[in-house]
Image (cartoon, helix red, strand yellow):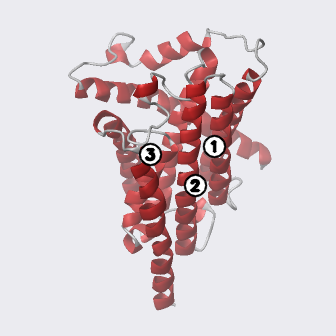
Amino acid sequence: MIIFGFISGLTGLLVSLLIIAFFILGERKILGYSQFRKGPNKVGIIGLLQSFSDLLKLIVKFKNYGFQSRSWVGLFGVVLLVGLVIYYSFVYGGYYSYSFNSLSLLWFLVITSFCSYSILCTGWGSYNSYSFLSSIRCAFGSISFEACFMCIIIFSALCYCSYSLVDFFLSDWLSVVIFPCLLFLYMICVLCETNRTPFDYGEAESELVSGFNVEYSGIYFTCLFACEYIIIFIFSWLGMILMFGGGFIGSIFLLFCLFFFMWARATLPRVRYDYFVNFFWEVCLCLLIFSFFVIVNCLYSLF
């Protein structure tokens, strides 16, 4: 059983990597067409091999980290983030093989709580003040997401009386029917967790840096870049399971989520930071806490 679970988790990781390769290409295409450009179109047929070409270019680069002691903290942050993403992929693969699924929804919350530590280590260990400030903003955004995500998990558990994702399969949209606002709030929360537009506070034009990863190159930047996109895919897939229970409609929602990330980056402006804090802690969190009363009243009226 353990070996089968390991194989399914490894398969989930490989599938995630393959999906994000074409997701990155699709995002660059959409960003190009939104700016009246063609986007990548040289490597392979209509640019299909562009992501693999960029990967090969990045992994052959190497940077020596032995000259600064604090750089090892940043390297630990990169390794920690990679390990967390691998565990995400194992939960994703285990869902389809019915392996390690007893508390799979809670494992998502556990893994998410460690992401802020990896981002802080990555920014602080880069020996750059702007990277450190960027990592603090991103870590606080991750904490804001965790508070809201915990409410979403509790609401889903109350709906289906389980913390196992297998029990959510073909759940007939129960959570969306009871509290439709949950779908909208979940998509906003995932934008915050992945540091995407309009909540990409790691990237500040006034500081002329790309965020907490500004001092990383080669394979280390590749790991940070790939982890961000894998998290996007995993949480889009999780939304498909929580909201629609999988199936055909759930697959359409998954594609919609992935396109929503591309569209948001090409269209939406960055929200002011104090507005972001006020929205998540005064509006989003309050609505999710209110959802507890909605589901409890619905269950009381049914039983």
Q: In the displayed structure, does residue 283 sit left or right of residue 57?
A: left
Residue positioned 58% across, 51% down in the render: 143
Tag 2–tag 1 contact (CB < 8 Å): yes
Residue located beneath label 3 in the image: 191
Task: State whether residue 39 is above or below residue 107.
Answer: above
Other-residue count near label 3 (Cα within 10 Å), few / some / many at <14 / 14–19 / ≥20: many
Alpha carbon separation for disc pair 2 and 3: 12 Å
Q: Where is residue 289 in the image (x, y as percent from the top left)?
A: 50, 71
Of residues 128 and 229, the one nearer the viewer is 128
Other-residue count near label 2 (Cα within 10 Å), few / some / many at <14 / 14–19 / ≥20: many
Q: Which amino acid does the dot numbered 3 rest on? A: Leu
Residue located beneath label 2 in the image: 146
* Label 2 SS: helix
**Residue 70 disc label:** none
Of the numbered discs 2 and 1, the one sitting upstream in the chain is 1
Counting the numbered discs, the total is 3
Residue located beneath label 1 in the image: 116
Q: Which amino acid does the dot numbered 2 rest on? A: Glu
Of the numbered discs 2 and 3, the one sitting upstream in the chain is 2
* Label 3 SS: helix
Asked if residue 98 shows in the view, the reply is no
* Label 1 SS: helix
State the image quarter where residue 12 is shown.
top right
